[in-house]
Image: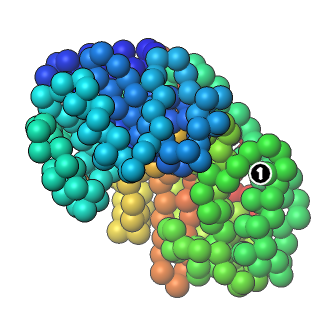
């Protein structure tokens, strides 16, 4: 109920009589529901959890106290109309990022008796700061992901395909009690210059960088990490690229304290990469929030607004991607603390692992 109470206070400040929460991740955050279809209606008098008959049994097991359970009949909007008329609300906030244009038009047509007000990220902003239970789950997800990779590492060799390595790593994550946070990325050689490329049937060859980007999910909470290995002896250029990325991450981590601006943090890493003339090959933001979603607020990029706060969980992931040569990314999931930070994925070495 603490999360609900915080949100109710926000609604009061914004003079909203109610809020329809249709983003299923936000529904899970507020209620504990792990199904794929439900809505939450918050009002000053009652909080309603609305779902269809498929999820009634699951709802009764999972939903925390503080909700009136409502079975959806004849569609969400018909059900919603009855509840709003019963409560006598004058306005209703909508999560605009979670509604299609068609859904919004239907709401306008069916709920003409009430003012519909767009809202942006009210629950997502609450999710920025993780509580102890959330942090515990993220830490466990990190452990699963690292343990799986450490089992895989001794078996990586010339001739294996990117596709086979990705499948094996996902199998190990599941075997250790986790779920797959996102489609595992394994890219080798020239393929590794694609920041979010998909594993192919290309086989590992001597001289290849091998970029792994993977994550585990535990009880709904995710982690995200990347390591880049090398098959065979490194060239001077490969050493330079790898050390550039590693040093950029280290410098960013050294400045990872509550109060630093997101944009400033991104600038620190970008400038460090620029010292070796590789700035144009750093093609994405430095990091992002991690929690119920792999990518959530905050975004840590050159135009990002806001500052780090204790309780945030983020990634720090500088990378250099050179076409026809290859790429390097080093990424960790990190908890921001009152006194600084704690790297949650520190059990897989960030020194260049040569196979």
- Residue 103, image quadrant: bottom left
Residue 323 visible from this viewpoint: yes
Of 221 and 315, the residue lying toward us = 221
Where is residue 277 shown, x and y percent of the image? Answer: 38, 66
For image coordinates 73% across by 67% down, the residue present is 166
Q: Is residue 101 left or right of residue 300?
A: left
Look at 26% across and 39% down and name the residue there.
81
The residue positioned 38% from the left and 50% from the top of the image is: 75
Specify whether residue 232 is in view.
no
Report how many numbered discs are placed on residues in the image: 1
Residue 209, horizontal then vertical, whole percent? 66, 71
Q: Position of residue 355 (x, y in %)?
A: 81, 66
Q: Is residue 159 left or right of residue 50?
A: right
Snapshot quadrant of residue 33: top right
Name the residue tied to disc 1: 173
The secondary element bearing badge 1 is classed as: helix
Q: Report the front residue among 271 and 48.
A: 48
Q: Position of residue 132 (x, y in %)?
A: 57, 19
């Amino acid at each position: 109920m603490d999360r609900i109470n915080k949100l109710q206070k926000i609604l009061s400040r914004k003079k909203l009589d109610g809020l329809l929460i249709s983003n299923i991740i936000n529904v899970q955050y507020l209620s504990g529901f792990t199904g794929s279809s439900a809505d939450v209606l918050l009002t000053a008098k009652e909080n309603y959890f609305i779902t269809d008959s498929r999820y009634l049994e699951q709802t009764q097991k999972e939903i925390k106290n503080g909700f009136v359970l409502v079975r959806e009949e004849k569609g969400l909007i018909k059900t919603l109309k009855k509840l709003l008329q019963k409560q006598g609300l004058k306005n209703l906030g909508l999560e605009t990022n979670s509604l299609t244009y068609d859904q919004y038009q239907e709401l306008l047509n069916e709920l003409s008796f009430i003012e519909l007000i767009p809202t942006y990220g009210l629950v997502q902003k609450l999710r920025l700061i993780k509580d102890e239970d959330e942090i515990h789950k993220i830490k466990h997800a990190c452990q699963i992901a690292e343990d799986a990779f450490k089992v895989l590492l001794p078996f990586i060799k010339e001739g294996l395909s990117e596709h086979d390595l990705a499948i094996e790593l996902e199998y190990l994550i599941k075997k250790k009690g986790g779920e797959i946070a996102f489609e595992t990325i394994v890219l080798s050689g020239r393929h590794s210059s694609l920041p979010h490329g998909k594993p192919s049937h290309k086989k590992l060859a001597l001289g290849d960088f091998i970029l792994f980007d993977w994550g585990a999910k535990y009880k709904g909470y995710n982690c995200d990490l990347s390591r880049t290995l090398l098959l065979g002896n490194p060239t001077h250029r490969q050493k330079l690229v790898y050390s550039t990325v590693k040093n950029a991450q280290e410098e960013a981590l050294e400045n990872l304290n509550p109060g630093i601006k997101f944009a400033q943090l991104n600038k620190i890493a970008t400038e460090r990469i620029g010292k070796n003339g590789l700035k144009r090959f750093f093609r994405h933001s430095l990091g992002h929030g991690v929690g119920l979603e792999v990518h959530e607020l905050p975004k840590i990029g050159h135009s990002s607004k806001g500052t780090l706060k204790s309780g945030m969980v983020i990634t720090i992931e500088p990378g250099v991607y050179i076409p026809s040569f290859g790429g390097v990314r080093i990424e960790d999931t990190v908890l921001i603390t009152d006194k600084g930070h704690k790297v949650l994925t520190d059990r897989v070495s960030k020194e260049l692992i040569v196979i």
